[in-house]
Image: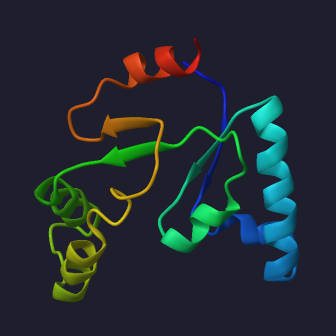
Amino acid sequence: MIGAEVVTGRDYLRMAKSEAEARRLFRKKLAGAVSGGNIIYVISESDQLDLLPKGAVRILVSADLDTIKARFRARMRGFLPAPVERMLEGKHGMFHHCAYDYQYDGANGDATALCEKLTQ
């Protein structure tokens, strides 16, 4: 498909001892990827959006709430604690109002078709 480094959430904090320095280095790395290279940055909190440089391709990956709960339940050996369920309900749809270039259905989407669009 496409070769890319994958970074999730706050993994970029490993780049430096201080959060400010890690954010600076990660922003620089992301900006470099816009002009050559691929980084897939999986954002889980809205405050992480400000790390994205101009020119970054934004993909909204979505799934219905029941699918997300079922995936979490499977990861938690069949039991979904009430606090986790409430957290999922509170965060569901939090990025739908944001600007994005592509939307991908994480439950029923065709990853191959999306990758083909991205490499054109």
Q: Quadrant of the C terminus?
A: top right
Residue reaching furthest to the left: 66
| x then y, percent, for residue 82 | 16, 86
Q: Give the vertical position of 82 relative to 67 (above or below).
A: below
| x then y, percent, for residue 75 | 29, 62
Q: Residue at x 27, y 30 (%)?
A: 109
Q: Residue at x 69, y 62 (%)?
A: 51
Instruction: Give the camera-side residue of 46 and 43.
Output: 46
Instruction: Give the camera-side residue of 48 and 82.
Output: 48
| x then y, percent, for residue 89 | 20, 74
The quadrant in which residue 3 appears is top right
The quadrant in which residue 73 appears is bottom left
The quadrant in which residue 95 appears is bottom left
| Left or right position of 92 against 117 | left
| Left or right position of 21 against 7 | right
Numbered-mark total? 0
Colour setup of the view:
rainbow
Q: Give the vertical position of 13 relative to 64 (above or below).
A: below
Q: Residue at x 48, y 17 (%)?
A: 117
Q: Quadrant of the N terminus?
A: top right
Q: Residue at x 30, y 48 (%)?
A: 62
| x then y, percent, for residue 42 | 53, 53
